[in-house]
Amino acid sequence: ADMFANEEGGPEPDWVITEREQFSDFRDLNKDGKMDKEEIQHWILPQDYDHALAEARHLVYESDVDKDEKLTKEEVLDNWNMFVGSQATNYGEDLTRNHDEL
């Protein structure tokens, strides 16, 4: 109800239907209609998902203009705002250190 209030009595938007399906199929693991501490932990920190690897792949995908799977200094600098806001670079902290590879 915080994000969608069906005040008009019409059909739910597709995104609400999708969220309900996600909840029932993937989030509510014990099917009790609510998320307990373990289910929330699994949702926020899934065991089979590497956040750092996913973020690194995202940065390369978005910044690698010539698609050679390598980032040049120019490609990084052209997309500096993405790197500064990235968890993979500790929100830009790593970019202020001296690195030979950059």
Image: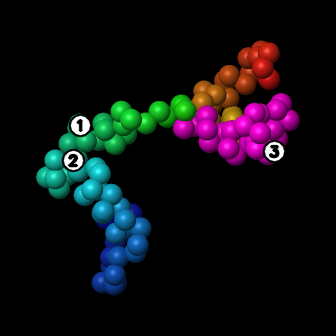
Where residue 59 sits, quadrant-wise, is top right
Residue on which the image places disc 3: 66
Is the Cβ of the residue at disc 2 closer than 8 Å to that at disc 1? Answer: yes
Q: Nearer the viewer, mark 2 or mark 3?
A: 3
Callout 1 secondary element: helix
Residue 23 in the image: above or below residue 18: above
The region drawn magenta spans 54-79
Residue on which the image places disc 2: 29
Callout 3 secondary element: loop
Q: Which circle marks residue 38 in the picture?
A: 1
Residue at the farthest right position: 74
Is the Cβ of the residue at disc 3 closer than 8 Å to that at disc 1? Answer: no
Q: Nearer the viewer, mark 3 or mark 1?
A: 3
Where residue 14 sits, quadrant-wise, is bottom left
Mark 2 or 3 closer to N-term?
Answer: 2
How far across and down, in percent of the image, does residue 38 sit? 23, 37
